[in-house]
Image (spheres, grey):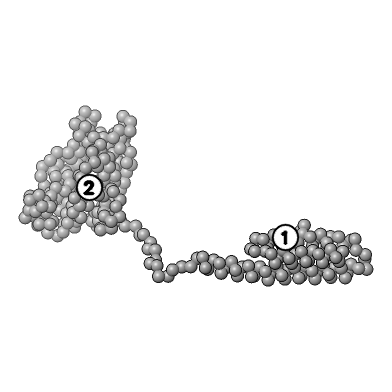
């Protein structure tokens, strides 16, 4: 038995010495000291040793185990040191190289323009509201005084999901939904994405954004509309900005107008930016049509109001002197970081 124990110890020490990595060393540990290891099997055969010799033999087994464990530990430390030195050699960091910069996102010109418009109207006491982009024909057209046979339905080149469901062509349906609630008075703006079947070019896109406003209360007049939009223009384009209202037609307002602002580049003298006219068209507006009030459950004999709508991209193009609307959607970081 002693000879067998000695042979096991010698074999274990020899294999430990041959181990070239930690995985191989662990295999040696399991092979000799594991539950089914060779040294463990010797301990299990103690019953074959004479009773008077068992204490001495047990001591020899423990000494052999202690020696094997000590050599295993020493070899493990040596191999770990070698592995660390190898890693340090292979993973050298060149501190002279420039550090990698984190790419931080940048707000889109549309986002900047929208937040500025919202800030202006919130300062006037307006609430920002939103509505669905996939809308019922009822809200997108009929409740805005645009019946089934109205030519405006053709002019707006609508995307139809079904006969009664469309991709909204304007954010005006939000106004109809707000009026339906009957919570008066109303002072809201409704920004959001809208859709029209337009060809993509420098000034058109099948998907773009609008911001529409609505005020409903007693004794609201066209003077309130003009004063509000004049203040909006001064806040957005500068204190010296002047406004001009031209008669127009919109089905959901009566009377209706388009508003121009004096060119904020030349002060109205005429330049390339305003095409020599001194004025720039900016938005459409008007007093809410009495029939729209009736369809939304508001008494037009008691309440009056005004509405207006402005293209968000148009504000961004004008404010930042962008010549091509397509630049807003190409996601070129070099372009976007200029704003």
Give me the residue at 26% from left, 44% from top.
208
Does 142 sit above or below residue 55?
Answer: above
Would residue 88 be found to the left or right of residue 338 on screen? right
Q: Position of residue 186 (x, y in %)?
A: 26, 47
Q: Position of residue 64 (x, y in %)?
A: 79, 69
> Quadrant of the image for the N terminus?
bottom right
Q: Which residue is mark 2?
A: 325
Q: Residue 86 falls in which quadrant of the image?
A: bottom right
> Quadrant of the image for the C terminus?
bottom left
Would residue 308 be found to the left or right of residue 82 on screen? left
The 10 Å Cα crowd at callout 1, few under 14, some 14 to 19, many 20 or more, is few
Residue 232 seen from this side: no
Would residue 291 be found to the left or right of residue 76 on screen? left
Give me the residue at 48% from left, 68% from top.
92
Q: Nearer the viewer, residue 297 or 76?
A: 76
The 10 Å Cα crowd at callout 2, few under 14, some 14 to 19, many 20 or more, is some
> Distance from label 1 to label 2 (Cα)?
71 Å
Tell me, for residue 30, which label it has, or none: 1
Would residue 161 be found to the left or right of residue 309 on screen? right
Q: Position of residue 307 (x, y in %)?
A: 20, 45
Q: Position of residue 103 (x, y in %)?
A: 36, 59
Q: Residue 113 falls in which quadrant of the image?
A: bottom left
Does 124 sit above or below residue 256?
Answer: below
């Amino acid at each position: 038995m002693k000879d067998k124990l000695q042979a096991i110890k010698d074999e274990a020490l020899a294999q430990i010495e041959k181990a070239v990595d930690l995985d191989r060393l662990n295999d040696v540990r399991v092979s000799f000291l594991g539950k089914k290891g060779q040294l463990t099997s010797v301990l299990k055969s103690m019953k074959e040793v004479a009773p008077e010799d068992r204490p001495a033999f047990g001591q020899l087994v423990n000494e052999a185990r202690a020696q094997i464990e000590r050599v295993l530990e020493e070899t493990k430390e040596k191999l770990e040191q070698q592995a660390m030195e190898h890693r340090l050699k292979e993973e050298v960091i060149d501190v002279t190289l420039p550090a990698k910069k984190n790419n931080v996102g940048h707000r889109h010109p549309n986002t900047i323009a929208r937040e500025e418009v919202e800030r202006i109207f919130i300062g006037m006491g307006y609430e920002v509201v939103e509505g669905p982009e996939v809308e019922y024909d009822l809200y997108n057209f009929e409740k805005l005084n645009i019946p089934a046979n109205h030519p405006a339905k053709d002019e707006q080149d609508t995307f139809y999901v079904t006969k009664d469901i469309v991709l909204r062509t304007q954010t005006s349906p939000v106004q109809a939904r707000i009026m339906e609630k009957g919570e008066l008075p109303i002072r809201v703006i409704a920004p959001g994405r809208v859709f029209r079947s337009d060809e993509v070019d420098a000034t058109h896109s099948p998907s773009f954004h609008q911001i529409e406003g609505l005020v409903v209360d007693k004794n609201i007049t066209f003077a309130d509309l003009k004063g509000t939009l004049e203040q909006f223009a001064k806040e957005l384009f500068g204190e010296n900005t002047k406004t001009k209202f031209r008669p127009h037609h919109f089905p959901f307002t009566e009377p209706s107008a388009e508003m121009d602002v004096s060119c904020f580049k030349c002060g109205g003298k005429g330049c390339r930016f305003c095409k020599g006219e001194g004025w720039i068209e900016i938005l459409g507006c008007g007093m809410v049509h009495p029939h729209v009030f009736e369809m939304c459950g508001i008494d037009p004999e008691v309440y009056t109001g005004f509405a207006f709508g402005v293209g968000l991209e148009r504000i961004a193009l004008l404010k930042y002197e962008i010549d091509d609307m397509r630049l807003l959607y190409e996601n070129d970081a070099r372009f976007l970081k200029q704003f």
